[in-house]
Structure formats: C-alpha cells, structure tokens
Amino acid sequence: MHPILFAVILVSAIGLIAGLGLAIASAVMAVPVDEKTERIRACLPGANCGACGFSGCDGYAQALSEGKTTNTSLCSPGGAEAAQEIAQITGLAVSASVPMTAVVRCCGAHQNAKNKLEYVGIESCRMAVQVFGGPKECAFGCVGFGDCVAECPFDAITLCDGVARIHPDRCHACRRCVAVCPKHLIDVVPKNQGIPAVLCRNQEKGALTRKQCTAGCIGCMKCAKGCETGAVSVVNFCAHIDPSLCTGCGKCVENCPVHCIHIQGGKAVLTIEE
C-alpha cells in the first residue's frame, strides 16, 4: 500500500474512533437539563448584567425554577414583558415592576467645569483617572471619555459636552454602566416618577467647588431648608434627596442657586429626551 494512502486511512480511522468515543462520553456524562429552567432562560434578554442579584440570566432562571426566588420582576432589562412570561411558565404571581433608568450625577459639561491639565493618552475614563484623578478640576466629576458608552449594550448613553447622558427610553437599567464608571457617578432610579435628583457628587467646600465647576453643589442648604417633608439633606457639602420622603413638589429645584437639581423629563441634563 502506498505510504500516503496508508497515512490518510490511519488518520481517518483515529478520527472516527475519537469521534465515536466523544459521542459516547457526551451521552454517558451528560448533565441533565431542566426543561423549566431552559424555558425561563429563553424569556430573559441575555444581558447577564447581574442586576437581578444572581450570576447572570442562567443563575436567575435556575433560581426561579428551583424556587430559590419567587420574584418574577428582578430582570430590569426584560421589564414587565419578561416578568409576565416567567409568571406564565412558573405559575407565580407577576411581581410589581417599576421601570428604572440610569442617571449620571454630574453637571460638569465643558461650559461649567474647568480643566486642570490637558490629557494625552488612551481615551478611557479608567486610564485618565490614573493621571491626577483625570483632566477636570473637579475630582468627583465625569471624566467624559465614554467607558460607559462602550459598555452599554443598548446604545442608551451619549457623550454631551464632556459628560455622559442617558436616553431613558433606551435604558434597560442593566447597571453595566454603574459598574464601569471609575467615579461611581451613575445610579439607577425609577423612570418618570417626578422625583428630583442632585446631579453632583462633589464633596468639597462650596468656595472650592465654585472654582472647579459653576454647576457643582455648594452645600448652601437652601434646598434642605425649603423642603417641607425633610427629604433633602446635605452631607459632606453635597445635597442628597430621599425618594421615599420626596413628594416631587420641585421646591428644591427652584431654590438651588447653581441649578444642579433636576427633575427627570424636565429641561435638564438628568436624561436625554428622544
């Protein structure tokens, strides 16, 4: 027999034997598949963001199937539609679902915030903050290089004048932007609830904040003094609003001298309206 023909036959035989062996092993060692888990998993969007508190969509589907949780609305990206489909499969009640959206707590656009240096390098927020905290005078503000934009799987984030902004109609509250922001400026809040948000995280004294950013919170207490329900407090020279106490009256927005408090859906920079 010709040596080349022999080699071809030998390699083919080895491949056939190995293939049969793998097929038998996969059948013998196969992990049983829970059909209920698979059906639930098919209802989830596959963002694997972990917002549900489990290890991605597979973990949430398994937890629902095994009864480790009965909350069908933990998937923020899937929303009410996914919750309804899960309830039909599991027989559980449809849990109340509040639409959520991300918000960037910074007003440090180019016209407001000053730069302390000219950054030359990889345009990445995580890289830029390694150089004296980033190019802006405010060490707490948005770096503006768009790590969150690149991370968002729903094209819901846009850079506007050096600050990241959220499209609420596109946002699925997957929290991937929250995890990637090196300044921890992004929070997830209820959509269209009329609750004001303080768009600043600066914790310097008011005089220094004003030198860094004309739209930064100066801790003047006017918002807190004007709030009749006690929803507004000032901690470390920065205002905070407790949504559980806020009635959405808007007095804090009116009283803020630097205009860093905004109501979602209003004129502002809290989110971008379509």
Image: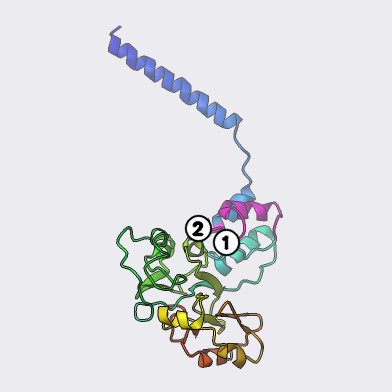
Distance (Cα) linking label 1 and label 2? 10 Å
Q: Amino acid at mark 2?
A: Ala
Which residue is at a point 64% across and 84% down the rendered structure image? 231
Are the residues at dot 1 and dot 2 in contact (C-beta closer than 8 Å)? Answer: yes
Q: Nearer the viewer, residue 225 or 43?
A: 225
Residue 154 horizontal side relative to residue 230, left or right: left
Reading the image, the residue beneath label 2 is: 47
Q: Nearer the viewer, residue 153 or 17?
A: 153
- Magenta stretch bounds: 43-69
The N terminus - image quarter: top left
The 10 Å Cα crowd at callout 2, few under 14, some 14 to 19, many 20 or more, is some
Residue that sits furthest to the top in the current view: 1
Which residue is at a point 67% across and 63% down the rendered structure image? 71
Q: Amino acid at mark 1?
A: Ala
Reading the image, the residue beneath label 1 is: 51
Question: Where does the image place residue 183, in percent across and percent down from the top left?
Answer: 48, 66
